[in-house]
Image (cartoon, coloured by chain):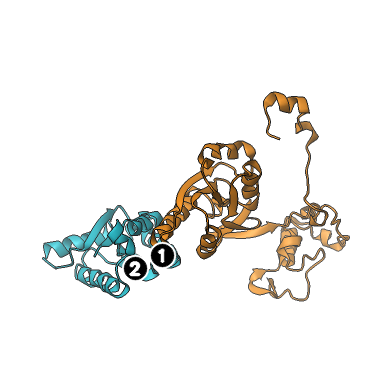
Amino acid sequence: MIIAEQKPLEEIFKLLQGHERILVAGCRSCVAICLAGGEKEVGVLAEALRLRAALAQLPWQVDEATVERQCEKEWVSELAPLLKGKDAVLSIACGVGAQTIQAMYPQVRVLPGLNTSNMGAPEEAGVFMEKCGGCGDCVLHLTGGICPIVRCAKSLLNGPCGGSQDGKCEISPEVPCAWDQIYRSLEGLGRLELLEEPIPPKNWMPSRSGGPRKVVRPEAVMTEEQKRQKGVRP
Amino acid sequence: MRVVGFICGHGAEGAFDQAGERRIQYSPDVMLIMMPCAGRVDVLHILRAFREGADAAFVGCCLEGNCHHVYGNIEARKRVEQAQGILESVGLGARRLEIFHLASNQAWKVPQLTEEMLSRVQELGPNPLGARA
């Protein structure tokens, strides 16, 4: 899932300067799980904005809505009736959600209420950890199911480095050394022999250096005729 | 002056009831809202109270380690802290909100905590929204 956190309220107030009719738009998917942009957070943020508006005598009229997934056009189309007359949408989904709304409704300014951080998972209640770097060339089968790209501070493919002490990384005594974890995981799996073979330099071509990445599933792609028949949005 | 108290139906409500039975005086400016548990108090409830013009608010809950619902008072504290952050950001000030722990036999705490909130309002001034609400 995508992990995000709300921008400081003071920053959000600045973003909204000059706007009057505002829709706070949340998402019930990843950002609801990481307690940043679900229905609950939309309610609290909208109320905070109303309170601020009343105190500072700002002309903000704040409405709220939460869709199932703000990254999919089908769900975002539910916002259409709520956007009438609005001059700003404060999206508290990830950056993908904010961009989807902006692409579908170019006449309304979309403002990001969250800072999108990473791809991760809940570690425990209220604690979310980055787990995947989205490098496009997965090596988890060689590393005991632990991503060295994002969980090792140096993204080492053949670790650990000299900064590994008592299972912790030199960057912080609270951060586990990914390569220590990899060793223990492979030990538990009875696959320590995987460490005998150095992992060769990774193919970084599918990573982020070549512009926005595109994944195509040919079996799911509709022909132009199908799109016309089904009324698919361009 | 208006102070809203969200009080849990176990510890705090008992203390306020007992204060009444014993004729222990506390300010009539305090308006109480009974909650099934302080853990049910939501940031939204607190913010709404201030938008409706409350000058101050408090959450009254069981003593720590003695919550009828085990963790309700711990949850309440987290929400109070979250709401305090928001109140600070919107310009009302975090000190208008507080959490108090009291057992049902601690009626003597009632005038203390209500006076504490009223004195904070004296110090901070009224909620500007109070006159407009």
Q: Is residue B39 above or below residue B113?
A: above
Q: Amino acid at mark 2?
A: Arg
Q: Which residue is mark 1?
A: B87
CB of mark 2 within 8 Å of CB of mark 1?
A: yes
Q: Residue at x 47, y 55 (%)?
A: A45
Q: Splitting the image into 4 quarters, where does residue B25 fall?
A: bottom left
State the image coordinates of residue B84 (x, y, percent, origin top left): 41, 66
Looking at this view, is A43 or A157 the one in front? Answer: A43
Res. A97 in view: yes
Q: Residue at x 43, y 60 (%)?
A: A52
Residue A122 horizontal side relative to residue A133, left or right: left
Q: Is residue B21 above or below residue A138?
A: below
Between the C-alphas of marks 2 and 1, the distance is: 8 Å
Query: Any idea which chain is the cyan one in this picture?
Result: B
Q: Residue at x 76, y 24 (%)?
A: A225
Counting residues from the start of the chain, the first of labels 2 and 1 encountered is 1
Q: Which residue is mark 2?
A: B96
Q: Which color has been applied to chain A in this rendered view?
A: orange
State the image coordinates of residue B1 (x, y, percent, origin top left): 24, 65
Looking at this view, is A195 or B28 the one in front? Answer: B28
Location of the C terminus of chain A (image quadrant) = top right
- Local crowd at mark 2 within 10 Å, few (<14), some, or many (≥20)? many
Q: Is residue A167 above or below residue A116?
A: below
Res. B9 in view: no
Q: Secondary structure at mark 1?
A: helix
Q: Secondary structure at mark 2?
A: helix
